[in-house]
Image (cartoon, rainbow, N blue to C red):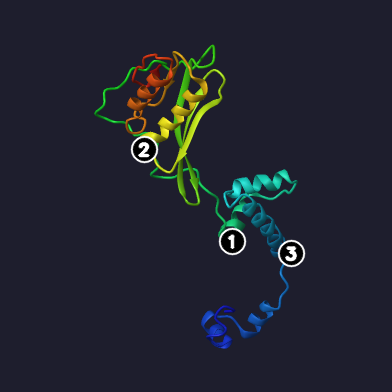
Amino acid sequence: MSANQATFPVATMGRVLGVSEAGYYAWRHRLPSAHALADAALLKRVRTIHASSRETYGAPRVHAELRADGEKHGRKRVARLMRAAGLVGASRRRAGVTTTQRDKEARPAPDLVDRNFKATAPNQLWVADVTFVPTAAGFLYLAVVLDAWSRKIVGWAVANHLRTELVVDALEMALGQRRPHNVIHHSDQGSQGSFKWSSQHRMEGWCDGGSATVGSGVAG
C-alpha cells in the first residue's frame, strides 16, 4: 500500500485488500520490533563482509566470518537476510568451461609416469595442468608447470584463450629457468591443440640436445 499510495487512495486499497484505513496508519507509525532491529543490524554486517570479499562470499562464508569475529548467528538466518537483500556469492562451478580437449582421432601417447608422481631430485618430473579463473571481464586461463620434487611452480602463463601457445609459453618459461636434462614432462592426454607436438619441439631445442618423446609424459 505504501508503494502505491501516490497512485491509489489508501481507503480504496484498504477495501480491496481487506485492511482498515486506521489499521494501515497504525502499522505505518508502529516502531520496529526488536527482532526487526536486530535483523537490520545483522544485515549491515553481512553487507560489509560481502562487499569486503568483492561480492564473492555466499552465506556459508559470511556466516564463518561472523563466527570468527565472535558473533553467533544462525546460518539459515544469514542466508535468509542475504536472499532478501539480493546478495549472492560467486560460484566455482561454471558450466561450459573445458580446459582439456582430447583429440579423439589422435593415437594415445605412452604414459611415462604411470601414476607414480614421486621424484628423487629436481627436474626429473614436471607435471603440467591448465585451469580457469573467473573474473569480472570473463574467464582467464592459467597454465602451470610444477616440479614434482619441490612442488614449486617452475613455469606459468596466463591468457584469455586456450590455444597452443598458452601451454607452450608455460613450458618455455620452465625450460628457460631450469634448463633441465632428461626431464619427463607429464600432462593430461588431449592438452590444447598441438601442445604435445609443440612441447616436443621446444624441449628438443632447450634440453641440452636431448631427444623428446611425444606423449602424456614428454621426456627431453
In the picture provided, is 115 more to the left or to the right than 106? right
- Between the C-alphas of marks 1 and 2, the distance is 41 Å
Numbered mark located on residue 34 in the image: 3
User: Residue 193 or 4: which is nearer the viewer?
Assistant: 193
| In the image, residue 82 above or below residue 6 | above
Question: In which quadrant is the C terminus drawn?
Answer: top left
Crowding near the residue tagged with mark 1, few <14, some 14–19, many ≥20 C-alpha atoms within 10 Å: few
Image quadrant assignment for residue 115 = top left
User: Residue 168 or 15: which is nearer the viewer?
Assistant: 168
Question: Could you tell which of marks 1 and 2 lies nearer the N-terminus?
Answer: 1
Tag 1 and tag 3, C-beta contact below 8 Å: no
Question: Could you tell which of marks 2 and 3 lies nearer the N-terminus?
Answer: 3
> Is residue 77 visible in this depiction of the protein?
no
Residue at image location 75% in from the left, 46% down from the top: 70
* Residue wearing tag 2: 163
| In the image, residue 158 above or below residue 114 | below
- Between the C-alphas of marks 1 and 3, the distance is 19 Å
Tag 1 and tag 2, C-beta contact below 8 Å: no
Q: Amino acid at mark 2?
A: Arg
Q: Position of residue 203 (x, y in %)?
A: 40, 21
In the picture provided, is 188 more to the left or to the right than 61? left
> Is residue 191 visible in this depiction of the protein?
yes
Image quadrant assignment for residue 18 = bottom right
User: Residue 57 or 1: which is nearer the viewer?
Assistant: 57
Extreme residue toward the left, this view: 105
